[in-house]
C-alpha cells in the first residue's frame, strides 16, 4: 500500500498518528486522525488518499473511490491516488479499470515493484500473459526475495509457454522457501511437460506433504502413478 505524507511539515501530527494507528490495526483511531487532518487541511490531497487507503482495507470501496477522486480533483498529477484506485478496482475484480489506473500511476512516475506487480496481475487476470510478462519480470528484478512476486512471475512464464524459464523460476521460489506447495506442484507440471514423470511424482509428493488437501497435486499424482503403472505392465 502506498501511504504518503511523511514529508509534509505542516499539520503533520494527525496524519502521522493516523498512519501509525492504521499500521497497528487501530482502524477507528486511524479514521478519526485522518478526518481531523482533512478538516485542518481541506486542500491537501494527502489526507484524502490515506483515508481512502484505510477504507479500501476495510472494504468500503464506494467511499474509498470518492476520497481518491477528491484527491485527484485537488491535484491532477498524484500517482499514489491512481495506485490506490487501481488497488480498489483490483479488489473488486474490475481488472481493466485497475490496469488503466496502474498504468497512469506509472506514467506519473511511480516505479516500484508494487505497481509493476499489480499491473502484471491485472493483465494476468484478463488472460493477457504476454502483456503481463515484462511487468512481472520487472517486479521480480526489483524485489528478488519476495516469494509472492517470484511465484507469480513463474506462473506468468508458464502461461506464456516459456516452460524452461518457468521451471527455473519455481526453483528460485523453492530456494526462498521449500514449504511452497504450489511451487512444487507447478515444477511437477513443468517436469511432465519435459516427459519426466518420476521426477514430477516426487514434486507432487512434496506438495502433498506440505498441503495434504492440495487437489491439483493429488490429481496429478494419481495420473502419473497410473501412467507409470501402465509402463510397467
Image (tube, helix red, strand yellow):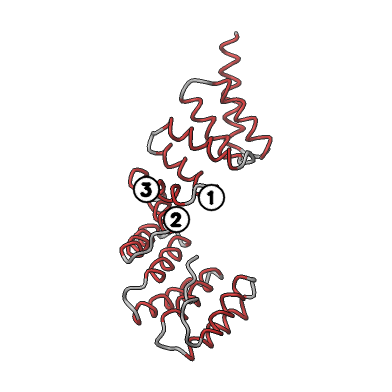
- Please give the name of the residue rendered at 33% of the width and 47% of the height, measured from the top-left corner: 131
> Callout 3 environment at 10 Å: few (<14), some (14 to 19), or many (20+)?
many
- Mark 1 lies on a secondary structure that is loop
- Viewer-side residue, 8 vs 220: 8
From the top left corner, tell me how far across and down residue 231 is, in percent: 56, 11
Q: Which mark is residue 146?
A: 1
Front disc: 1 or 3? 1
In space, the residues marked 2 and 3 are separated at their CA atoms by 14 Å
Residue in view at x 51 percent, y 26 percent: 191
- Residue contact at pointers 2 and 3, CB within 8 angstroms: no
Give me the C-alpha separation between circle 1 and circle 2. 10 Å
For residue 227, which quarter of the picture? top right
Which residue is tagged 3?
A: 132
Quarter containing the C terminus: top right
Chain-order first, disc 2 or disc 3: 2
Q: Is residue 114 above or below residue 140?
A: below
At 45% from the left and 89% from the top, the residue drawn is 41
Q: Secondary structure at mark 3?
A: helix
- Residue to which mark 2 is pinned: 113
> In screen coordinates, is 180 left or right of 125?
right
Q: Earlier in the sequence, mark 1 or mark 3?
A: 3
Q: Nearer the viewer, residue 226 or 204?
A: 204
Which one is in front in this view, the residue at disc 2 or the one at disc 3? 2
Amino acid at each position: 500500500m502506498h501511504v504518503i505524507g511523511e514529508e509534509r511539515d505542516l499539520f503533520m501530527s494527525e496524519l502521522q498518528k493516523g498512519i501509525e494507528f492504521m499500521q497497528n490495526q487501530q482502524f477507528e483511531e486511524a479514521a478519526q486522525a485522518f478526518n481531523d487532518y482533512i478538516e485542518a487541511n481541506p486542500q491537501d490531497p494527502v489526507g484524502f488518499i490515506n483515508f481512502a487507503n484505510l477504507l479500501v482495507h476495510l472494504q468500503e470501496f464506494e467511499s474509498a473511490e470518492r476520497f481518491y477522486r477528491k484527491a485527484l480533483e485537488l491535484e491532477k498529477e498524484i500517482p499514489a491516488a491512481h495506485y490506490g484506485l487501481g488497488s480498489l478496482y483490483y479488489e473488486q475484480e474490475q481488472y481493466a479499470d485497475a490496469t488503466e489506473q496502474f498504468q497512469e500511476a506509472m506514467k506519473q512516475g511511480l516505479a516500484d515493484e508494487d505497481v509493476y506487480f499489480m499491473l502484471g496481475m491485472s493483465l494476468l487476470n484478463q488472460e493477457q500473459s504476454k502483456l503481463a510478462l515484462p511487468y512481472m519480470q520487472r517486479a521480480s528484478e526489483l524485489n528478488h526475495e519476495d516469494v509472492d512476486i517470484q511465484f507469480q512471475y513463474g506462473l506468468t512464464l508458464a502461461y506464456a509457454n516459456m516452460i524452461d524459464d518457468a521451471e527455473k523460476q519455481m526453483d528460485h521460489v523453492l530456494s526462498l522457501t521449500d514449504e511452497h506447495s504450489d511451487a512444487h506442484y507447478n515444477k511437477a507440471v513443468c517436469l511432465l511437460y519435459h516427459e519426466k514423470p518420476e521426477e514430477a511424482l516426487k514434486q507432487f509428493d512434496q506438495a502433498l506433504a506440505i498441503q495434504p488437501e492440495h487437489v491439483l497435486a493429488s490429481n496429478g499424482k494419481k495420473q502419473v502413478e497410473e501412467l507409470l503403472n501402465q509402463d510397467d505392465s
